[in-house]
């Protein structure tokens, strides 16, 4: 530390935007966006509604935006802009200006994923873990506890942010695996049903000989009856 200008090693400083911890959060959120795209494709393959497809796309864009924000600190610029416009920071350093919109967006996305993945208990448990982690991170960011220990608050905030991103990635991955299993079961059931119908001869039009009916002369047949008689 004595070889640095400010006594800190930026790569290991959790409060630095260019640290290894920040890079981990960027990668985790970007992977969440990619996994959400895969989930959307699986849901489209399962013939989901157009509205659900668009909602999955919106969730995907949210993760990509959060990944960009983590690397470019867009929320800090937004915070300073709103604080300058309103003339007040309301609480602490004004982080409430970006924390509240993020909370609302993440809550809406979480409820949507919760409803979609309700059939996968492991994904639901992981999603609740993500919610708890992000809630603790927001509380630490707003300095609502341990106000006299900023280093500990920073450690809790950044750790919970990375843990929340990991839980979200686990949620989406577990749900994607569950969707693949469901699609395979549906395909196997459809194939078994088709083989059963084929073995019983269902879905085919018997010819005149199989129906023990005398063939009529072609001049007495017209339209579909003539076509059926030609191929029988």
Image: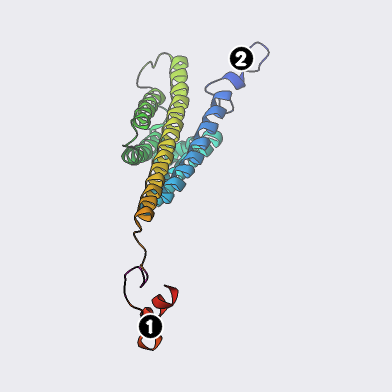
Residue 217 quadrant: bottom left
In reply to whether residue 209 is colored magenta, the answer given is yes
Residue 207 is labelled as none
> Which callout, 1 or 2, points to the residue nearer the camera?
1
Q: Secondary structure at mark 2?
A: loop
Secondary structure mostly seen in magenta is: loop
- Pick whichever of labels 1 and 2 is earlier in the sequence: 2
Residue in front for this viewpoint, 107 or 186: 186
Direction from residue 161 to residue 215 in the image, left or right: left
Query: What residue is shown with label 2?
Result: 7
Residue 164 quadrant: top left
In reply to whether residue 18 is colored magenta, the answer given is no
> Does 47 appear above or below 143?
below
Note whether residue 88 is visible: no
x, y percentage for residue 194? 38, 53
x, y percentage for residue 79? 45, 36
| Quarter containing the N terminus | top right
Note whether residue 35 is visible: yes
Direction from residue 90 to residue 68 in the image, left or right: right
> Which residue is located at x 45 percent, y 34 percent?
173
> Which residue is located at x 39 percent, y 81 percent?
226
Residue 223 is labelled as 1
Residue in front for this viewpoint, 175 or 143: 175
Which portion, as a residue range, is magenta?
A: 207-213
Q: Secondary structure at mark 1?
A: helix
> Which residue is located at x 31 percent, y 71 percent?
212
Residue in front for this viewpoint, 6 or 101: 101
């Amino acid at each position: 530390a004595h070889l640095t200008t400010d006594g800190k090693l930026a790569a290991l400083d959790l409060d630095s935007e260019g640290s290894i911890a920040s890079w981990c959060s960027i990668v985790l959120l970007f992977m969440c966006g990619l996994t959400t795209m895969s989930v959307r494709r699986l849901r489209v393959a399962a013939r989901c509604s157009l509205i659900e497809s668009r909602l999955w796309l919106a969730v995907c864009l949210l993760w990509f935006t959060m990944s960009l924000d983590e690397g470019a600190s867009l929320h800090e610029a937004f915070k300073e802009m709103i604080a300058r416009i309103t003339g007040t920071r309301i609480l602490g350093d004004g982080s409430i200006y970006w924390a509240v919109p993020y909370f609302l967006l993440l809550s809406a996305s979480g409820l949507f994923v919760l409803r979609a993945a309700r059939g996968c208990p492991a994904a639901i448990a992981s999603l609740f873990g993500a919610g708890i982690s992000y809630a603790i991170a927001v509380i630490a960011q707003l300095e609502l506890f341990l106000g006299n220990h900023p280093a500990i608050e920073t450690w809790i905030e950044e750790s919970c942010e990375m843990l929340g991103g990991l839980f979200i990635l686990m949620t989406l991955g577990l749900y994607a695996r569950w969707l693949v299993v469901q699609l395979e079961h549906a395909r196997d059931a459809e194939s078994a049903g088709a083989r059963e119908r084929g073995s019983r001869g269902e879905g085919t039009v018997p010819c005149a000989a199989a129906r023990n009916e005398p063939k009529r002369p072609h001049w007495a047949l017209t339209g579909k009856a003539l076509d059926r008689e030609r191929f029988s």
